[in-house]
Image (spheres, rainbow, N blue to C red):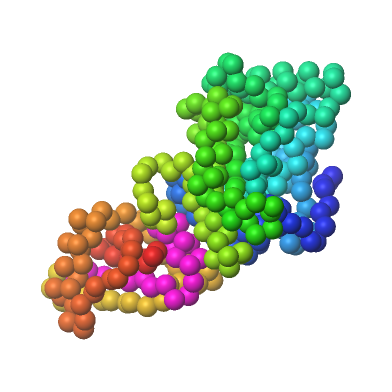
Amino acid sequence: MPKRARPLKVRRSEHWLRTMVNLHASILDAAIIRAFNWHNSSIDWRSPLQSDQYAEYYDQSFLDRLGVTEVIMPLREFWPRSGPRWDGLACTSDGKLILIEAKAHIDEMVTFRSKASPETLLRIEDRLEQAKEAFHASKDACWHTSLYQMANRLAHLYYLAGINGKDAYLVFIDFANAPDVPEPVSCEEWQGAVRLAHKSLGLKESKLSRRVITIIVDLKNGNGHPSAYVYPPSKKEEDTMIVPDFRECAMQSMSLGKDRDFCELYLQDNSDTEVYWGPCWQPDDMYLQELMDEDWQLVERADEQELLQTANQFNRRYQIEPKGKWIWFLGENRHLIGINVS
């Protein structure tokens, strides 16, 4: 399987993506799952993995790595050899394919055009035009210069999802406040750059564009406490840690550290309410895996107060007064769980 071997020591976006995938995967997983509103999905990272010498995949090897075996159009027919080197690849438990492109400073976004031969360049530009049309992008937008790299990634999403009917998605990961770039980029600067890039490529709402997201990872002080959120958000919401899915919320809380709390109650109408209040789960917690199998419904804030009042009414041990920002889920048999995400 042809693949691009990578050195053990790298910098900038390659280093930070390795760090996130191999040490903080739960943060990326939760952001991606939340952005696409996936339920009951888990993410299996295929690259860059420490166990695979952080290899990068391209051409047919990236399809092989994702387990894509049957296609309507072979990749060699769609795109010339030596195509995009994918910064990351992943699959979900229910068969979705995820392509990753990462950046750590804005200058990396600008790629004026392919260095291919004139004949090959014509072929590339033809495919870019097809992809642009499939994305319903503005006809006057130019996809073969300035933002060529971003455009060819979009074109490969079109190849997988549009031409071959695969359940594929493209995730751009932008690292804010990376300490090893000439001019670290703030989250706000990345937001502006993403907005300008989308405008320059003439991207609009379309079936394909809904398969594309940008995640901004704020490294803060190095890789000590990274956090991730989707831009632009699907709705106006200042608290980007709130996620409308039990599994995502649990993963977010685990990523915040062992000192995070969760509260578990079995609401009773005429007896003591069973209560557990303590540290949040760890990734290898078997009980958490059991909870994942239950059906959970997000509790609105108004209902949350009512449920807590009910719990406190019958709880004779102590009154439940969660501090900070909590998300509550109601399961079967009035099983209530609150997770601290502050």
**Which image quarter: residue 54?**
bottom right
Residue sticking out furthest to the front: 183
Residue 255 on the magenta segment? yes
- In terms of depth relative to the viewer, which is nearer, 15 or 169? 15
Compared to residue 276, the image places residue 204 above or below, namely above
Residue at 80% in and 22% down:
121
Q: Find the magenta span and give its range.
A: 246-268
Residue at 48% in and 67% down:
256
Please state the horizontal and vertical placement of residue 46, each as a whole percent of the image: 68, 52
Residue sticking out furthest to the bottom: 317
Compared to residue 257, the image places residue 77 above or below, namely above
Residue 48 on the magenta segment? no
Q: Is residue 204 left or right of residue 178?
A: left
Please state the horizontal and vertical placement of residue 61, each as a whole percent of the image: 78, 42
Please state, as top left, top right, bottom left or bottom right, where the C terminus lies in the image: bottom left
Q: Is residue 134 left or right of residue 121?
A: left
